[in-house]
Amino acid sequence: MPRIAIDSLDDPRVRPYCDLKASNLTRSELFIAEGTKLVARLIDSRYETASVLLSEKREAEWLPRIPEHIPVYIIPQELGSQLVGFSFHVGVVACGRRVPSPSIDILPRDAARLTLVVCPNCDNPENLGAIIRISCGLGVDAILLGKGCSDPFSRRVLRVSMGTAFRMTIIESPDLGDDLDRLHRDWHVEFAATLLDPTATPLHQARRSPRFGLLFGNEHAGLGPEWTARCQQRLTIPMHGDTDSLNVAVAAGIFLHHFTRGDECGDETGKVGR
């Protein structure tokens, strides 16, 4: 494999790694996987690994694990911290290349069972990363994201998702409203809005259709009326005492566990987009 020693922060070959704390490479052609688990999962995924950046102390351990065609940049520990903009104590970072987002047309129209998660405006990277990880763990077939969402391949989202974004089918919809209308009309998907509303159906009374999607709002504004109007159910988690709400990722885990607990576990999550 190409092993390249880096001795200057101005080296253009490591520009994608420059000051990650500030730039986060949001919506760039490239994305960053940070840490040993994420880098390993990127290398094993369908996404191209454009390069790997290693500190000198990790070179002997990691060089045998990296395919020969991937460029590997070796950098002194102190210089690495200056480059990325934070402590480079883990010493393993990689740069991946995006693929175009799929459309809803990859979803099977004749599936006996389909489970979707829809986020019109999840603009908090930590929440989106957690929802992706929860969805992957509980067998969701695909996640649909509206234009108001954080970048699912930003460094913070990938870190919180622990690389499950590499396995999930993630659809960044250019027109989420139209996609939901088509999914209901042509795929016969029934959607449920998750709300803070005492008039909504309590979760323990809720049932799902075989083809089913859950809509989650963001932390502050929840779901707007334009999204609730596209749903066939309105669901809520009853709360005790003076607690008014849960974090949206926590709520997503509760809702998804309720609706997927009878599903078989296996390795099928994300197969639609692979």
Image (cartoon, rainbow, N blue to C red):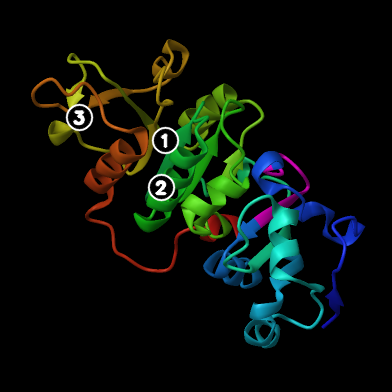
Label 1, secondary structure: give it: loop
- Which badge, 1 or 2, comes first in the chain's sequence? 2
- Cα–Cα gap, marks 1 and 2: 8 Å
Name the residue at 64% across, 69% down.
Answer: 92
Quarter of the image for residue 165 reads bottom right
* Badge 3 or badge 1: first in the primary sequence: 1
Q: Which residue is mark 2?
A: 114
What residue occupies the far front of the structure in this picture?
78
Farthest-out residue, top: 225
Check if mark 1's residue and mark 2's residue have beta carbons within 8 Å: yes
Is residue 156 in view from this perspective? yes
CA distance separating discs 3 and 1: 22 Å
Quadrant (top left, top right, bottom left, bottom right) of the C terminus: bottom right
- Nearer the viewer's eye, disc 2 or disc 3? 3
Asked if labels 3 and 2 touch by Cβ distance under 8 angstroms, the answer is no
Q: Amino acid at mark 3?
A: Ile
| Drawn side of residue 3 relative to residue 238, left or right | right
Query: Which residues are the magenta region?
Result: 24-32
For the residue labelled by badge 3, is the local secondary structure a helix, a strand or a loop?
A: loop
- Amino acid type indicated by mark 2: Leu
Q: Residues within 10 Å of mark 2 (few under 14, many from 20)?
A: many
Instruction: Report the residue marked by disc 1.
Output: 189
Label 2 element class? strand
Query: How many neighbours does mark 3 have within 10 angstroms: few (below 14), some (14-19), or many (20 or more)?
Result: many
x, y (%) of residue 241? 8, 23
Q: Residue furthest left?
A: 241
Asked whether 254 falls inside the magenta stretch, the response is no
